[in-house]
Image (tube, helix red, strand yellow):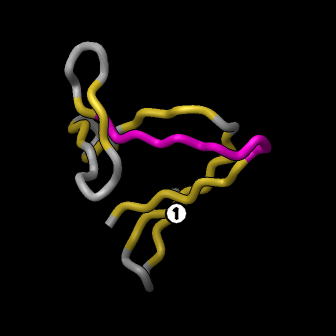
Amino acid sequence: MKFDHYANQWFTTMHIQRGEYTYKYVLNGQNWVTNEEELTQKDKLGNVNNFLKIWLSTKATLQAWLC
């Protein structure tokens, strides 16, 4: 990840294929958190995760950021 001092945000770019993805952010190397401003869903154990679904049939680029 790279930090943009102008935007005061962390950025990363990932090349991912279509499909469904769940994720969380790790803060301070130990705290797993979700971003409430992004889509969420519960997994089979009831844990809340952020959720992303890529619909494109070709590889897509996702740019994620942390404030």
Spot occupied by residue 18 in the image (x, y as percentages of width and height)? 66, 37
* 56 is within the stretch colored magenta: yes
The number of callouts visible is 1
Give x and y (percent) for residue 4.
47, 75
Q: Which residue occupies 22% across, 25% down?
A: 47
In the picture as drawn, the residue positioned furthest to the bottom comes out as 6
**Measuring 42% from the left and 81% from the top, which residue is drawn there?**
7
Q: Percent x, y for residue 45?
A: 23, 14
Q: Which residue position holds label 1?
A: 2
The picture quadrant where one finds residue 66 is: bottom left
In this rendering, the answer to whether 19 lies above or below 4 is above
Q: Judge by depth and name the residue closer to the eye, 62 or 30.
A: 62
Q: Residue at x 24, y 32 (%)?
A: 48
Q: Is residue 9 above or below residue 19?
A: below
For mark 1, does the 10 Å Cα neighbourhood hold few (<14), some (14 to 19), or many (20 or more) residues? few
Q: Nearer the viewer, residue 3 or 7?
A: 7
Relative horizontal placement of residue 52, taking residue 57 as reference (left or right): left
Amino acid type, residue under disc 1 in the picture: Lys
Q: Quadrant of the C terminus?
A: bottom left
Residue farthest to the right, as pictured:
58
Q: Is residue 17 magenta?
A: no
SS for tag 1?
strand
Q: Report the residue that reaches farthest toward the top.
A: 45
* Residue 43: quadrant of the picture: top left
Give how far across and how far down residue 34 sits, in percent.
Answer: 26, 44
Magenta-colored span: 49-59
